[in-house]
Amino acid sequence: MGYRVAVVGATGNVGREMLAILAERAFPIDEVAAVASSRSQGSEVEFGETGKMLKCQNLEHFDFAGWDMALFAVGSDATKVHAPRAAAAGCVVIDNSSLYRMDPDVPLIVPEVNPDAIDGYTKRNIIANPNCSTAQMVVALKPLHDAAKIKRVVVSTYQSVSGAGKAGMDELFEQSRAIFVGDPVEPRKFTKQIAFNVIPHIDVFLDDGSTKEEWKMVVETKKILDPKIKIQATCVRVPVFVGHSESISIEFENEISAKQAQDILREAPGIMLIDKREDGGYATPVECAGDYATFVSRVREDPTVENGLVLWCVSDNLRKGAALNAVQIAELLGRRHLKKG
């Protein structure tokens, strides 16, 4: 006996990944619905590689009564209207937008990190999925925090254009082609040329000079992992189609060596350690695209602080950063609360 699952935003990058991962992981489904905006009504999306085509239903008119879970992959504006409607109908919402992440009555979940927090979902019938850059970082930080207690984190991200949706991917492709043929390059989605460039700006600027993306990494990590950890983030968009990378410097309360950290990470859930100190002995976005794991490489001691480590972390942002984490939350919810059969 399986679940009735609605994927909201099924025609977008993340929504399509959600459908693909539900199929890949053989999530126990009795019925799946593809739900999207009115402009996509009637269009078809494939349910993973099953060959089954799903006709998109209009979100405005979709009745969530009788559905067990809804995986939301739409913007905050649509989520604000329809997530409470779904929750009120008894359908548990797993939301990928930023709308509910800092709501004290909504658990913010990365299953490898804070699974017990999911028990609080009953307050609103909503569970939040963290920001893509936060999700992969806390997977890497959690086992090290358990071992030596993290005091401070300084992270610089190298985030792919797919984090800005299809429009971001299209812009990188079109600009790259334009440069090769000598056509003019006009930024539309991004504030500056993204092809053959890097942009130290993701989301809006805040009063203190940080961006909202950087703020998200700080507050979400504190909520998921430990509010006492001090965090500084610099978030950068790079000309990569899929896969976010992060350089993470960590200061611990207790002593921990690079060798100890490698041994811990090698056994940690959700992590693939690729750390050979030789040419090519590390992970890059090209290798992680399409994979479930969070890859960790370049683990080394930081001599500038007491009890410091530095590491390199890479993950597919459309998967662990969004769709995969949402499906893992659904799996966790099923195991702990919505048991079938």
Image: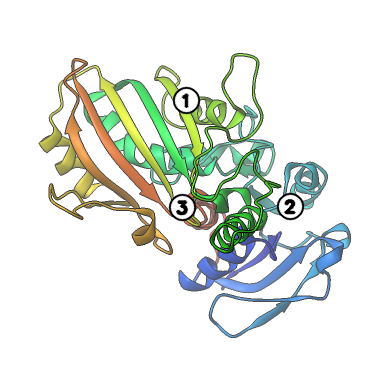
| Quadrant assignment for the N terminus | bottom right
Q: Amino acid at mark 1?
A: Lys
Real-space Cα separation, disc 1 to disc 2, in angstroms? 30 Å
In the rendered view, tell whether residue 147 sits above or below residue 287. above
Q: Badge 2: how crowded within 10 Å, few (<14), some, or many (20+)?
A: some
User: Which residue is labeled 1 in the image?
Assistant: 222
Residue 8: x %, y % from top left: 71, 59
Residue 186: x %, y % from top left: 69, 48
User: Which residue is labeled 3 in the image?
Assistant: 320
Task: Residue at the far bottom: name it.
Answer: 51
> Looking at the image, is mark 3 or mark 2 earlier in the sequence?
2
Camera-nearest residue between 38 and 329? 38
**Left or right of 137, for residue 44:** right
In percent of the image, x 68 and y 44: which residue is there? 125
Q: Amino acid at mark 3?
A: Lys
Q: How many marks?
A: 3
Q: Amino acid at mark 2?
A: Gly
Q: Badge 3: how crowded within 10 Å, few (<14), some, or many (20+)?
A: many
Q: Is residue 320 visible?
A: yes
Answer yes or no: do the residues labelled 1 and 2 have beta carbons within 8 Å? Answer: no
Q: Secondary structure at mark 2?
A: loop
User: Which residue is labeled 2 in the image?
Assistant: 90
